[in-house]
Image (cartoon, rainbow, N blue to C red):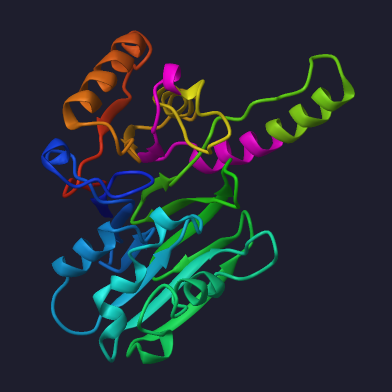
Amino acid sequence: MKFTFRGVRGSIPSPGPHTVRYGGNTTCIEVRTASDALLILDGGSGIFALAGQLPPGPVAAHILISHSHWDHIHGLPMFAPLFIRGSQVRLYGAADAAGNGIGHVMAAQLQDNYFPVSEAAMAAEIGYRTLAVGERVAIADAVVTNAEMNHPVINLGYRIESGGAALFFSGDHEPFANPHAAGTPEHAACQDDIDRRQGAIDKTVNGVDALIMDCSYTREEYEGKRGWGHGTFDGALELALRCGVKRLYCTHHEPTRSDDQLEAVFADVMARFADRLGPLQVFLAAEGMTVELA
């Protein structure tokens, strides 16, 4: 199994000379299973670049949507195979808080107020699979398991296993925090819920060859961003170390951060964790980076 980063920025595309080395497209990862089946993690603007790398003609693609915020889906209508007769495109994701299935994401996005081409005008065969939290499904020769992450909307992280290798991807994830005063019933109840949810995430991440994780903020920046639903470098490293991960790929880069600034904050956190890393390898994700998992 191998994967290629097609978009690594968070919140909004940020192209320009200051993001040339790591890329300015929003989240999208191309995954190829052991049999070369195509799985796609999120549909940010990077999915347009991914489509340009595919061979001409119809394709079969499975698109796993973490959640419905714009930067994770705004590239979907520009995915060229949707307009090619014979293509088979299947979208997977969770229902929203109102119970609307994953098909609602595409339907809402393709309203004529927002996009000039309706789904009915697309030539591909398009299907939908709404996933329950924690559900395990077979997709081609891969097994996909999800865990609910911490975000203002329902947000799934995905574990993909194929050919004896495993990866876990979380588009967005904020570290859990208990807002209640210690010793109160509210604190105890909240902590029980946090422990349950964190335990489910840790179980799903455990032992993966590659962890692809939201690292939007430094620990200092996070204090002013609480509740926004995004992660920190420190939180991702703690998760990787706790779960025995082999490689951590830091992604969802803050869109206002230049490549030089990104490397500087990465060097700072790596220096602080240097004596704890052991065999864990840590990388900054960059557009076009391909990783092959043994």
In the image, residue 96 sits, relative to residue 237, either above or below, namely below
Q: Is residue 202 magenta?
A: yes
User: Please, is residue 90 above or below residue 166 in the view?
Assistant: below
At a point 47% along the width and 52% down the height, the residue shown is: 158
Residue 155 on image: x %, y %: 55, 51
177 w.r.t. 73: above or below:
above
Q: Magenta stretch?
A: 196-221
Up/down of 105 relative to 277, above or below = below
Residue pushed farthest right? 185
Give whichever of 237, 220 is nearer the camera. Answer: 220
What x and y, as percent, mark residue 62? Answer: 38, 70
Residue 123 is a magenta residue: no
Q: Residue at x 34, y 87 (%)?
A: 124
Q: Residue at position x 68%, y 59% from top?
A: 97
Position of the N terminus, as image quadrant, is: bottom left
Q: Position of residue 135 (x, y in %)?
A: 60, 59
Q: How many marks?
A: 0
Residue 209 shows in this picture? no
Q: Residue at x 28, y 72 (%)?
A: 79
Please identify the quarter of the rendering in which residue 40 is found.
bottom left
**Foreground of the two, 196 or 53:** 53
202 or 83: nearer the viewer: 83
Residue 96 visible somewhere in the drawing: yes
The residue positioned farthest toward the front in the image shown: 113
> For this view, does 68 lie left or right of residue 272?
right
